[in-house]
Amino acid sequence: MTAEVLFDAQPLLSRLEDASLPLCKQLDISFKNPGKELKFRPLEISDYQKGYIELLSQLTKVGVVTEDAFVKQFRAMKASGVHYVFVVEDMDKDLIVGNATLAVEYKMTHSTCLRGRIEDVVVHNDYRGKHLGVLLVETLTILGKELGCYKISLDCTPDMIPYYKKFGFLEGPQVFMCQRFSD
Ligand SMILES: CC(C)(COP(=O)(O)OP(=O)(O)OC[C@H]1O[C@@H](n2cnc3c(N)ncnc32)[C@H](O)[C@@H]1OP(=O)(O)O)[C@@H](O)C(=O)NCCC(=O)NCCS
């Protein structure tokens, strides 16, 4: 049975064939070769069963996410057509060990433009230091550029600033403001 995927990655990743991903190249890692038994691919509806929510809990508070709620959210993301959630799976263990999202926004400014955000970057505790973070962040950043985003941003804690600077992200003059309506 074919798995239900969030989006068709093939045409997107084929855009990256010739694109420059200098950090990945330097570290000898790529979306085609993420490591032994590892697969880089879009989120699938069956990933709930593969530890996906547990992985996200290593990033932030996930609360209660039932399989029904996951499926509903997956379908909403799919229908939106602007959420490119990529994961890394350990095929040997049926375990999702890495995740990052490129979310694209359509805007009327800048002569009608696209703007990207990198979100939910996390690598499973047991798989850190194997360059999967670099693979996810650099691939999604360059994909955003290839899709035509005029800029890509992300929110992070101050201790992560040196990490993201490696990919070309810079601290801007803007400050991040936030109003929370629930936890
Ligand atoms: C941040 C995270 C995604 C990195 O994933 P990873 O796969 O372990 O990272 P990589 O292997 O690609 O890169 C590791 C390199 O980055 C460096 N690094 C890690 N955290 C760093 C930081 N805060 N600042 C600077 N460098 C950092 C490591 O020292 C290592 O350097 P080296 O390759 O020279 O040894 C992972 O630690 C994680 O999931 N953390 C918890 C969730 C989180 O904080 N996500 C970011 C939200 S903004």
Image (spheres, rainbow, N blue to C red):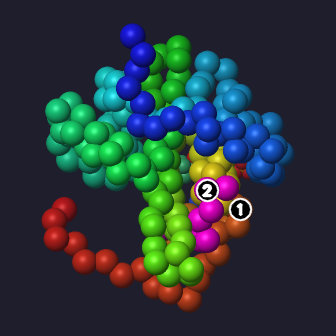
Q: Residue at x 42, y 80 (%)?
A: 176
Give coordinates of residue 25: x percent, y percent.
81, 43
Q: Which disc, if any, is residue 142?
A: none
Q: Residue at x 41, y 37 (%)?
A: 6
Asked which quadrant contains residue 179, the reply is: bottom left
Q: Label 2 belongs to which residue?
A: 147
Is residue 138 visible to the viewer in this orientation of the structure?
A: yes
Q: Secondary structure at mark 2?
A: helix
Looking at the rendered structure, the secondary structure element under dot 1 is loop
Of mark 1 and mark 2, the one earlier in the sequence is 2
The extreme front residue here reads 111
Closest to the observer: 18 or 141?
18
Q: Name the residue rendered at 58%, 40% in the picture.
A: 128
Residue range of the region highlighted in magenta in the rendering: 146-155
Tell me the quadrant of the picture where the N terminus can be found: top left
Q: Are marks 1 and 2 in contact (CB under 8 Å)?
A: no
Give the distance between the C-alpha atoms of the residues marked 1 and 2, in whole angstroms: 21 Å
Give the labeled residue for mark 1: 166
Please give left or right for residue 50 compared with residue 61 in the image.
right
Residue type (three-letter) at the residue carrying disc 2: Leu
**Residue 43 in the image, given as x and y percentages of width and height:** 43, 35
Beta carbon at label 1 within 8 Å of ligand 1: yes
The amino acid on which the numbered mark 1 sits, given as a three-letter code, is Lys
Callout count: 2
Residue 155 pos. (x, y %) = 47, 68
> Could you say which is closer to the camera, residue 128 or residue 89?
89
Asked whether residue 149 is drawn in magenta, I would say yes
Quadrant for the C terminus in the image: bottom left
